[in-house]
Amino acid sequence: MKAIDVFKRSGRNLRQSKIRTLLTASAIAVGGFTLALTLAAATGARNFTDRLIQANFDPKSIVVAKDKNFFGNGSGKPQLYSTDLNVSNGALIKQFTAADVKKMEALPHVKQVIPGYSITSQFVTRPGTKQYTGSVNLYDPTSKPQLKAGTVPAVMTKDEVLLPDDYISLLQFKDAQDAIGKTITIQVRQISGKTRAQDYKIVAVTTKSSLSIDFNPTGPYVSIDEAKDLNTFITANTVVSDLVPMVSIRGDGVSADDLKSEVTALGYDARTAKDLQAFLNQIITLLQSIIIVFGLITLIASFFGVVNTQYISVLERTREIGLMKALGTSRRTVSRLFMVEATWIGFIGAALGAAVAWGVGTALNPWISDKLNFGKESLLIYKPGQIAALILFLMFITTIAGLLPARKAAKLDPIEALRTE
């Protein structure tokens, strides 16, 4: 029997048992659906991390911490006292002092050191409105905020500010455009009770973006120099005076990796944009692996379902197999016939699962993008190559599942088979 004849006959045999074929293929489809959706989500998440890093980090800049535990969230255990040891985000870590910053600024390829200040305002207000407490944030020029109105100058002056759009109604502006050019007052306070109030001109209004790491509605953004002055005032005469948990460094005429080597030679810990991207992708891979495991468990159950279905098919067609052998059909051809049938089941199930996953993903993408503020971007991204590889993989799995039933069919004695009622 020619290969094309085996192919056609196997398809005809499956059509004769449509219900059983579809039920068996449906079990494969469940695993295919899970894996296809997981691959699409992982692809979309990796694309998102790529855009996230590009929008928030200069590829030639690095993030530096004095404590090697900083990127691991620090230590919660008691440590030997040190003047540069302080609590940051609930964890004990060594922080940069003014001397550390000067040491890094003295490196040959360092263009600018930007400290990561953490500033809390006493309140933000304007005449005729209530007072609102929040953070005062440092505007990093390498970031790309999503603006609702106004423009961000190339170099912000000390009296300029970026205002999150959540403050528009609170501070009684008509809209974002109405706020441009107006002033707000930010007051900060020392532990001693001494206060400092300063007026700032609004040059731009920011809005929430899925690609924003730092921009949020908790408070206005000021220039680097102003953030330094505010931090110095608030922490004056305290044990945390001028301490910062991390800094970002811009290089000049050198790659991020080479700049990282210069900084780590001083005993500090540093991460490039690629390092941060790899870390995020590692988390995505871990989550993807967990979901894939559940998909594979479904496939294992489906594997035995295919074996069971094919064994039943062999028993039901014992006389047919005996007649085929009596007419000269080889054992190899009989075996191939049942393996091709198993492969067909895998193809039907995989294609069905992938099609449903694509349909569900296409339908959900607009809703997901809206909820996650992705704009025109999608979380679930399907790649034809991945789908094709998944279908081939599932076809291979079902082909393996058909080996034992095919072997049993091939070994049937034609005389004994023809005697079967």
Image (cartoon, rainbow, N blue to C red):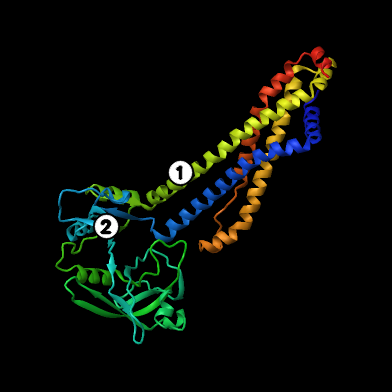
Residue 413, given in percent of the width and then of the height, sits at 77, 13
For the C terminus, the quadrant is top right
Q: At label 1, which amino acid type do we have? A: Leu
Query: Would you call the spot at circle 2 few (<14 residues within 10 Å), some (14-19), or many (20 or more)?
Result: some
- In this picture, residue 169 sits left or right of residue 101: right
- In this picture, residue 193 sits left or right of residue 418: left
Relative vertical location of residue 93 with respect to residue 299 in this rendering, above or below: below
Q: At label 2, which amino acid type do we have? A: Ser
- Kindly identify which numbered label has been placed on residue 286: 1
Secondary structure category for the residue under label 2: strand
- Kindly identify which numbered label has been placed on residue 256: none
Q: How far apart are marks 2 and 1 (CA)?
A: 27 Å
Does residue 255 appear in this view? no
Which quadrant holds residue 248? bottom left
Query: Would you call the spot at circle 1 few (<14 residues within 10 Å), some (14-19), or many (20 or more)?
Result: few
Residue 367, given in percent of the width and then of the height, sits at 58, 61
Secondary structure category for the residue under label 1: helix
Relative vertical location of residue 109 with respect to residue 209 in this rendering, above or below: above
Q: Quick check: marks 2 and 1 in contact, CB under 8 Å? A: no
Residue 275, given in percent of the width and then of the height, sits at 38, 49
Residue linked to disc 2: 88
Does residue 212 appear in this view? yes
Which quadrant holds residue 385? top right
Q: Residue at (21%, 70%) from the top-left corner?
A: 234
Q: Residue at (78%, 30%) from the top-left corner?
A: 10
For the N terminus, the quadrant is top right
For the image shown, how many numbered marks are present on the structure?
2
Which quadrant holds residue 52? bottom left
Relative vertical location of residue 156 with respect to residue 283 in this rendering, above or below: below
Q: Earlier along the polypeptide chain: callout 2 or callout 1?
A: 2
